[in-house]
């Protein structure tokens, strides 16, 4: 599992092609989790932080939410781009 995450960064085309060719559902799940993990961690962290520091959820998320949105978009575009390239070369 850790090797495939590393390989998604190092050689995304070959890694995604191998996962699609073998139809490995657990590794497909890995790609989805890799794309969604940054935003999930941020939301959980934000909830915990607000409850500990303020005793309630704050309605304003601030500039950190914008930064997380940009990072999340970059991760999804990166994985999406390589997935499209793999499907085009089939």
Image (cartoon, helix red, strand yellow):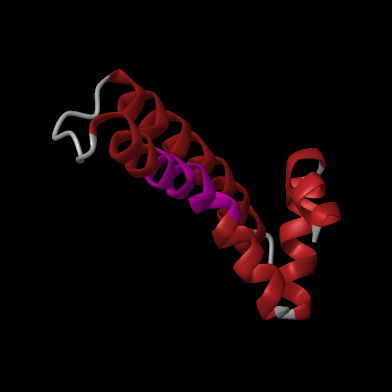
Q: Is 76 on the left or on the right of 13, as rendered?
A: left
The residue that appears at 71% across and 69% down in the rendered structure is 27
The residue that appears at 60% across and 52% down in the rendered structure is 34
For residue 54, which quarter of the picture? top left
The one nearer the camera, 87 or 25, is 25
**Magenta-highlighted residues:** 34-45
Q: Is 81 on the left or on the right of 44, as rendered?
A: right
Q: Position of residue 7 (x, y in %)?
A: 81, 48
Q: Position of residue 71 (x, y in %)?
A: 47, 31
The one nearer the camera, 19 or 65, is 65
Residue 39 lies in the magenta-colored region? yes
Count the numbered circles shown: 0
Above or below, comparing residue 62 to residue 1 in the picture:
above
Prevailing secondary structure class for the magenta stretch in the rendered image: helix
For residue 57, which quarter of the picture? top left
The residue that appears at 44% across and 50% down in the rendered structure is 40
Q: Is 89 on the left or on the right of 66, as rendered?
A: right
Above or below, comparing residue 75 to residue 66 in the picture:
below
């Amino acid at each position: 599992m850790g090797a495939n995450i590393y390989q998604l960064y190092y050689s995304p085309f070959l890694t995604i092609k191998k996962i699609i060719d073998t139809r490995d559902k657990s590794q497909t799940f890995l790609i989805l989790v890799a794309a969604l993990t940054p935003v999930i961690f941020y939301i959980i962290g934000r909830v915990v932080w607000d409850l500990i520091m303020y005793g309630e959820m704050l309605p304003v998320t601030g500039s950190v939410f914008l930064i997380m949105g940009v990072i999340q978009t970059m991760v999804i575009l990166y994985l999406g781009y390589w997935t499209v390239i793999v499907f085009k070369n089939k």
